[in-house]
Amino acid sequence: MHQRTMHRRSPLGRPRGGRALPVVASLLAAALLLGACGGGSAGTGANGGKAGGGAASAPVELTVIAGWAGAEQSQFMPVLKEAEKKLGIKITYRIYRAEDLANVLPPQFQAQQAPGDVIFMWDWWVKQNHQYAEDLTDIWQPQASQFTVPAAEVDGRVYALPYDMNVKPGFWYRKSFFEKNGLQPPKTWDEFLALLEKISKIPGVRKPIVSGDGTGWPLTDETEHFLITFGGPELQKDLIAGRVKWTAPRVRDIFQSRLIPVLQYSSAPIEWTQAIDLWWNGQYALYFMGNWITGMVKDPNDLGFFPLPGAKGIVGATDYLFVPKYGAHVAEAKKLAAFLISREGQALRVRQGGGKLSPRRDVPLDQAPAVDRMVAEQIKGMEILPDLDDSIGGDWQRLFWDQLKLLWVQPSSLDRVLRTLEQAREQQSTSGK
């Protein structure tokens, strides 16, 4: 089996974009509602699922919602096109970030409306709101043994299915930049610091490391990599489970003696897709990012990466999909969900590249582009770990993003940041939110 075993996602969306302000959430809710009423999905109330709709010969139209835009959207569309042919349906794709959906879906569901027929969302969120999701146990059980990650279950029933997997393997660089400047990936911590110092003296380089921003999630990915490298994979698991406090001396020491010294070589947070351009153009030399970056650069063959020396684990992230109860075509939506997680659907997605690895064991790695195979080879033997903030979720996740942005620009705030994170973690554990 390939080396990618694990957990959750992220992603979804790669979580990307700022926390929704109330007015933005309201506008988005209105847009979703209009789309639901005017489009092919939604709005028939509970136990929807009326097949067809409209003229007898007209194909069913489904709406798929996910957070992928740009290159990621382009890589996903061939899968939806194939599904249209296989299932004899029409599919409309809409882009909404998971952060925004988390605000607007609950009121729509309470009104028995659904903006989409298949929606990609965080697994923890679907679990918390499983009363609005279709039971997908019958789809999952026959092929569960082929998956390296679990479905999202509540009381033994499945409500969300794993679709794809990304990993966050380390600092990316351009091979051509390293060759031009006589640089080598570091093998020790001291070599890493020496590399940053050497890069800082290259003319035209603003900072050795560019720090991506969105809602703040790129900073959490980098922070988790430091925690895993210097605290071991168990520390990541213990922080997720609440068995170790954020104010614990060994946690503080990793921040103080490892992460903060690196911040002097790092930029202030920059919108993460803009940061890719600046890094690719040589204004920065290193970028900590997930392997989806392989689908977002002009020449993936010029990419190299290295984890922090000594790392024995990396974070993997899975995107999950679910079928809302209130779609107009629930039966067809379930067929689409089944196709998306099938061996055929998964192999098709992997072949599109962009760092998407399949969570299925029976999708061979040789289906992936060369750069994705390079990543898989380089992380072989490492433990794939759950994404920390995705796993904890809730209000704490957004607080984590915000506090790290503060730390990045004001390292002296470390103790206040750690106290804030611990207090909120304890409060969320008590309240369950």
Image (tube, rainbow, N blue to C red):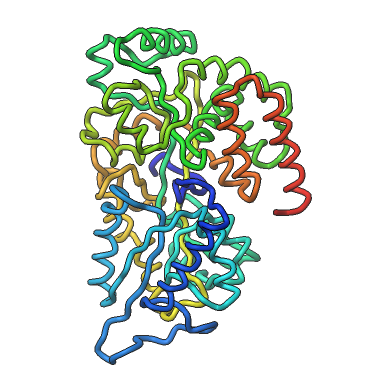
Q: Position of residue 111 (x, y in %)?
A: 58, 77
Residues 147 and 404: in front is: 404
> Residue at the spot x=71%, y=24% of the render?
415
As rendered, which of 409 and 363 lies closer to the eye? 409
Q: Quadrant of the N terminus?
A: top left
> Residue 172 vs residue 258: left or right?
left
At which x and y percent is residue 431?
Answer: 76, 53
Give above or below for 133 relative to 227. below
Answer with left or right where residue 70 lies relative to residue 257.
left
- Which residue is nearer to you in this view: 261 or 166? 261
Task: Give above or below for 181 relative to 313.
Answer: above
Q: Residue at x 66, y 36 (%)?
A: 239
* Among the 4 quarters of the image, the one containing residue 182: top left
Instruction: Identify the residue shown where x is 40% and y is 72%.
Output: 35
If the image is split into quadrants, where does the C terminus sit? bottom right
Q: Position of residue 143 (x, y in %)?
A: 43, 62
User: 185 above or below 31?
Assistant: above
**In the current view of this chain or complex, which residue is farthest to the right?**
430
